[in-house]
Amino acid sequence: MIRAATSNALRRAVRSSTRGAPSCAVPGNMSFHASAKREEDASATGAAPVESKGGLFGTGLSEWFALPIGITAAVPLVKFDWYVVNEETQLLAVFLAFCVTVYTQGGDAIYKALDQKAIDLLKEHTEAEDKVIEALEQKLVFLNANQNMVNDFEAINEIRSETYEKLNAAGAIKPQHDFKAQVQRMLNMIAQEEASHTDKVKTALMAEATATVTDKFSTDKALKKAALDSAIAKIKGGKAGADPIQAAFVQFFKEKAAAVKASGDDSEEKAQREAMIAKMNSVAKNEGFFFQFDSKGNPSMTV
């Protein structure tokens, strides 16, 4: 009974002494969650808190009265062997000394460690919530941006329809432009071939005329003397007659034209025309023209 009474007295003394302890020693003061405290939950339920007078054993007296009361009570307890001082007492003293030492020397460190851990947990929880909020905000922006998706697709379909209509209209006109370009290509080719043939004929005629006139003046002394006299007169600046060399070239071209007209041989022209038609048909076939030429040079559509 004495031990039970002593234990109860010590428990009450420890409980009363914790009323002036720091916040780290008070149960329920440390919170590691973002939720409200238990005191707030209890107040929300409507339960009225029990008022305590405080002090020694709830009497309102100062806790320091426990010291003389304890000394006064210890004397008869020890005197009449109601409380035996043995190894249990020593263990109790050591445990109390350990508790007092830890409370006075390491209480603040333990409180700060636990408080820092709570702060870190709260910080991590807040960062996680911020990330979730940011992700939800991005999702909200994306959903708001996708509200006009239907209108965008409708506009794209309208543009596609207009583009197809324009392509169809252009497709109806494009063959005409292609045919025009092909005709122009053939006309340019004919013009180039005629110009090239004309240059060749001129060169051949001039070479033949030069050779003929040179041979004529080499064999005829009268022509040679007339040419020499005309040249000397031009050098002296006197009045000179007609140039015999020029007259000889003019006479050659007249005789040549008369000979061609009298002969009536158009085999060379036919060969040239056939070569030209074959060349144009080859170009038209290789480049996919819409027409070709027959043996007479008349065009005929191939599409």
Image (tube, rainbow, N blue to C red):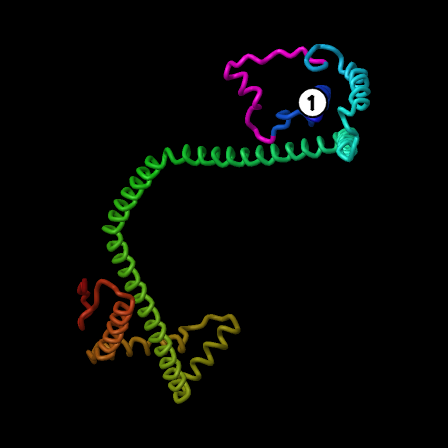
Residue at the (55%, 33%) spot, across then down: 130
Depth check: give the residue in front, 8 or 105: 8
* Tag 1 secondary structure: helix
> Which residues, given as a range, are shown in magenta?
32-55
Measured as percent of width and height from the top left, residue 126 is found at 58, 32
Q: Mark 1 points at which residue?
A: 5
Measured as percent of width and height from the top left, residue 168 is found at 24, 48
87 vs 186: above or below:
above
Task: Name the quadrant containing residue 104.
Answer: top right
Measured as percent of width and height from the top left, residue 151 is found at 33, 35
Question: Is residue 52 part of the magenta span, yes or no?
Answer: yes
Q: Main secondary structure of the magenta part?
A: loop
Q: Is residue 180 left or right of residue 296?
A: right
Which residue ends up furthest to the bottom in the rendered image?
Answer: 219
Quarter of the C terminus within the rendering? bottom left
Residue at the (67%, 31%) spot, across then down: 115
Quarter of the N terminus within the rendering? top right
145 vs 176: above or below:
above
Which residue ends up furthest to the front in the rendered image?
Answer: 80
137 vs 5: above or below:
below
15 vs 86: above or below:
above
Task: Name the quadrant containing residue 129.
Answer: top right
